[in-house]
Each structure stands twice: as C-alpha cells, then as structure tokens.
Image: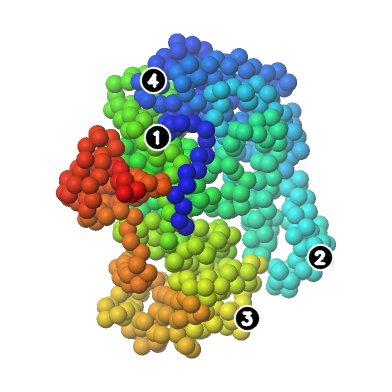
Amino acid sequence: MSTHEKTYVTNASFMLHGGDYNPDQWLNRPDILVYDVKLMKLSHTNTFSVGIFAWSTLEPREGEYNFIWLDTIFENIHKIGGKVILATPSGARPAWMSQKYPEILRVNENRQKQLHGGRHNHCFTSPIYREKTQKINRKLAERYGDHPALLLWHISNEYGGECHCNLCQDAFRNWLKEKYNNDLQALNDAWWGPFWSHTFTDWSQIESPSPIGENAVHGLKLDWKRFVTEQTISFYENEIVPLRELTPNIPITTNFMADTVDLIPFQGLDYSKFAKHLDVISWDAYPSWHNDWESTADLAIKVGFINDLYRSLKQQPFLLMESTPSNVNWHPINKAKRPGMHLLSSMQMIAHGSDSVLYFQWRKSRGSSEKFHGAVVDHDNSPNNRVFQEVAKVGETLEKLTDIIGTNRPADIAILYDWESNWAINDAQGFGMDTKRYPQTLQQHYRPFWEKDIPVDVITKEQDFSSYKLLIVPMLYLVSEDTISRLKSFVANGGRLVMTYISGLVNEHDLTYLCGWHHDLQEVFGINLLETDTLYPKDENYVSFHNKIYQLKDYATVLSVHGAKSEGIYLQDFYANTAAITSHSYGNGKAYYIGARLENQFHTDFYDEIIDELAIMPAASVKHGKGVSVQVRKSASEDYIFVMNFTEEKQLIAFSDTVKDIITGDEITGEIILDKYEVKIVLKNTSK
C-alpha cells in the first residue's frame, strides 16, 4: 500500500520515550518521587503511563477517592514538558471490591470460582464490574480530561483470559441466538450437531467448552473464542463511554501482546476485531534477545513480522507501549541485553513504524513478583549504571528523529494473517499436532523480503487486497466463501497470489468443503487437492524446482493438475514425479500453489523470481551482508533509512546514494563499517 501522507496518532511533537510509572508504590517515599523528576530529565524521557494498577490507591474504600497524589504526578511531569498516558485501573481491582461483590470473580473452564488475587481475573460480563470501572473512569476523565499533560488514554492493560461463570454462559447463549437468528437448527447445522449425538434441543443446554464437559465440537470452540473477543471488546467499550463523552479529542489505546518465546501474535483475542475500536495500536514487545536457539537476525525477523502486523491493522504508525531496557523476570532464562542491543532493538521498532519507545518499567518495584524486572531506574537509584546510560542514549537519539513522526512504510507485498484460521487449525485433530505452526510458517514466508529489504504489510482478511502486487496466504486453513471470492477477484484483476498446503479446507464454521477443493479455488489455481501427507519428524522428501533440489519436511499435498503449469515436482514416495509447485494464469493475474513445507532456501529462490517479474525493488539502495536489515519510513520528500546490524560481527555496508547521517549530520557515500549491533539512521532527499 503506497502512501506518503503523515498520520499523527497523538498530538505530541516528539518521539515518546518513557514508560510505566508507578508512583503509587512510593507514596511513603516523597524523596524518591522528587528524585524521579531529576532522573526523567537525565534519561531524556518525556512520556509516562500512570495509574495502570492503581485502583486500590485511587479508591482505597468504596466511594472514597484519593487523587491528590496523582495531581502531583501530573504537575511534576507537566513542569518538565512531559506527557502523561493515563491508564484506567480495571486490570487489577482492589480487595474490598472482590470481598463485597464476589460475582466479579472469574470462573475457570473447570467451573471453579477464582479467589481474589493476581490481575485480569475479573468477569467481563459482570454488570457490577462494568458499573465500577465506568464510575472510576468518569472520575479520572472529569479530573484530568483538560490537563495539558494528558496525551492518551491507556485502557486497562493487556486484556486477556476467559470467564465461564453463569453470567458469561447466559451472555454466550444470547450471543449465539443473535448470530444464528434465534434458529437452533442453524446452530446445530453449523456445529455438525449429529456428531456424537451433540444436537441441542434447547439453548439452555449449551455451555462453553470445558475439559470436564464438551471439548470436541470445533464449531462450538470456534464460536466461543469469537464470543470471548467480542465480550472483551464489549467490556472495553463500556469502559470508554465516559472518556469518549468527556475527552473526545484524547485518543484511546490498549496494549496488545505477543508470545515471547516463539514471538507470535497473542492468540487469546482476535486483534483484527479489536483494532477497529482503537484510535492507536500499541503493543508490548519482549523478545528473548541473545537466546540459544536462534540467531539474533532470526529473532529480528520475527520482531519485524509482529511490528508489520500491528502497524498494518490500521495502516498508520503504532506505539511501543512496553519493552525492557535490560531484562525481564518471567522468561525461562532472564538474560540482560548486551551493550548496544537496547539502542538497536529500540530503533528496529521505530524503523517498522513505532512513534515511541516506552518501557515497563520506569522504576523497579521493591517487592513482589516484578522487583527484578528490568527498569530505567534500578534499586541503586543511580543514573550512572549501564542500563540507565543506554536508555539516555536512546532518548538522545529519539530527540533527533522528530521529523519521522507520523510517517508510514508503503508496501507492494502483503501476507495475510488470520486469528480465526489459527484457532481452527490448532483445534483440527489431524495433520501433525506439533508441526502446524501457522504463525511461524507466515514468518518463514516473510523472511525472504526482510532479507532483501523489501517492505511487507501483514494484513487481515477484512482489509483491502487491491493495492498490492503480491498477496501471500500461507496455510489459510479456514476461509469463507466471501474471502475466496475476494481472492479470486484479486487475481482476476491482475494480482499475484501465493497459497500453500493446508489452505481452503474449511468454511467459517469449521465445516469442510465438499466435492474436492472449493470450485473457485480450483478455477483460480488450475488444480485440485487429492490428499495431504503428514510426515514424521525424521521423515523427509525432496522437491525439484527450476533445476534445484530442496528438502521437504512435515507436509506434502498431492495434487491433480487441470490447467496449471507444474513448476516443481516431488522426488520420492508414492507421489514422486507429480506436481508439488504450480502456477496458473487467471484473468489478468497469476496464482501459485506451494504444496509442501520446504526449506528457507526454496522461499528465497521462489520469491526472487516473482520479485524480478514484478520489478519490486528494495526500499533503499544499500548493499550489505546477511543479518543486516534495512528498513525505510517515507514522507513526501524524504526517506528515513535505518541500517541495522543484527549480527555479532562487524559488517561492511555501502550506500549507492549520498545520504545524511541524522544523528551526526555527516554526509555518507559509499562503504562504511557497522559494528556489532550498530544502527545507522540516514536521510535521503527524494524531492530532487
């Protein structure tokens, strides 16, 4: 998608730098709160998220409010020219509320009511909890809505989890009645009711999935996950009523998440649905840098993929709401960032579209579970340690990047990611239980473009396909008639479409398509799918593609070809010498099918040919070796080029054009050396 117009997601005139600040933990130490202001200036930070888990301080007893401390914090931050991201406190409620109103406590899937404690353990359906959250939010909006330091509303924190209480059961049944037009037979048809005699004769018989009850009806499980997303959004929408009413000009966000080991999108909620209700996308990034199972560059590819997904949800800059300047406290191994990695990893976020680098947390807690989680201010309370100094360096760098605020990353290529399809394929009792790896497969297809400095949008099925030259839809297991129709139109109108094994097998109810592969897909691709062979981990096969041999693992689709061109064939097993990779001209476009899971080198070679055919160029003309990434944000007249060394060795790079180093002001032409973990940010004028 091509656009050079700037989109400002907040009214700040600077890159946001700071993070979660919990002064409510330090009210008995006013000296520390005074010193924090000095440290904020020394660290070149300017934006602080406050109030995230402060409900027990804001309302220590029902109806008794304490805002004086927060007034002081607002004023302290405002006096240094800073901004406040004000959070609503619903992520962790006070004990008095759980004691007085036990209905707000969550019930787990085993139908056990939870005790007070932890966080995100409340019922999203509870009328009482909805009333209480809206009331405290109104108080906050009335008191701080006109404060000049207020920049953004941060709603709750990392929404997630499920409640299976009676209130939620009733809400689920009502949701189903609306979805199926109060037609129980339509629901039974969608869920394939006769299976195991699971036909329902009354709405009251339906319950949410449970390991002690129904857990094998895939249509039920899929609809439950959809309901959880929509009920969470409903809770969020209830929270923001007073904020929209009293502060209509203050944008609203909530922080999305990603799994930190595999670094895949959070699976508990469908963020493609949630994104529509937010003004700004923000997310919490905690990659396991310096781990022992992948290279630094391999991890950087995954970070880039998540960034491009969350940026593409609204096709505008996003915010990095949480990160760590050093380590975390909940990885299996909590390794500190090595010197230089904090600046590099922060600039990667900016390069992919973030207008902020924010941390959890500003100051380390003294007690409880997060007392050893990384922070800007450590227990030594000193600005002289390595981490604080590296944070200050990030701040100094961000101060020179203000012109980048609001710029985007136009792309000619899109990869389609779908939460519902991932839910459905994970439930599918077939294929390889441990080798489906849908998000990881998309990251594998993303890799060749990252390595070639070609920008990619990671889009969802609701978004417009028409502006892209190439659309890649790996493992799109669940696909509706509507999506198939839109894919068909995309190719007919001149687009290039790539689809892979285990795609187009079930509809939106997780019911299989009958009479072979869907007839429209057969028409577009010129093939039919006969069967999918699932390999054991030690099994392997090979595919010949354009005179090269590639290793095959996990999956191989046996195809019948009717009109398509066979571009590659299987070399072993009962389907040897049959088509493994095909291409087919359809309308003004072309559709490719990759029938097997193949090694990375195949994707490099396969996409190289398409890139050449479509004349897709890198975002910037910079020569470099493996492990260096070049990402570009564009305005109408300037390219902001980030050259990042995600390796442990020095790397030679070469600029084809004369560029200006944004940090030093020096002009650069030709070859330079990047140190380990070094990033170079340069400006190229494109108006000449």
Label located before the other in sequence (2 or 4): 4
Seen at 25% across and 45% down, the residue is 659
Q: CA distance from mark 1 to mark 4?
A: 18 Å
- Contact flag, marks 2 and 4 (Cβ < 8 Å): no
Residue 401 locus on image (x, y percent): 36, 36
Label located before the other in sequence (1 or 2): 2
Relative depth, front residue between 50 and 353:
353
Residue 529 locus on image (x, y percent): 51, 82
Total residue callouts: 4
Residue 682 locus on image (x, y percent): 28, 43
- Contact flag, marks 1 and 3 (Cβ < 8 Å): no
Disc nearest the viewer among 4 and 3: 4
Could you say which quadrant of the image residue 129 lies in? top right
Q: State the SS at label 4.
A: helix
Label located before the other in sequence (1 or 3): 1
Q: Report the disc number at residue 183.
A: 2
Residue 569 locus on image (x, y percent): 36, 83
Three-letter code for the amino acid on which mark 2 is drawn: Asp
Seen at 66% across and 65% down, the residue is 219
Residue labelled with disc 3: 514
Q: CA distance from mark 4 to mark 3?
A: 65 Å
Q: CA distance from mark 2 to mark 3?
A: 24 Å
Residue labelled with disc 1: 402
Disc nearest the viewer among 1 and 2: 1
Q: Report the disc number at residue 41.
A: 4
Label located before the other in sequence (1 or 4): 4
Three-letter code for the amino acid on which mark 1 is drawn: Thr
As drawn, the residue found furthest toward the top would be 31
Seen at 63% across and 25% down, the residue is 145
Three-letter code for the amino acid on which mark 3 is drawn: Leu
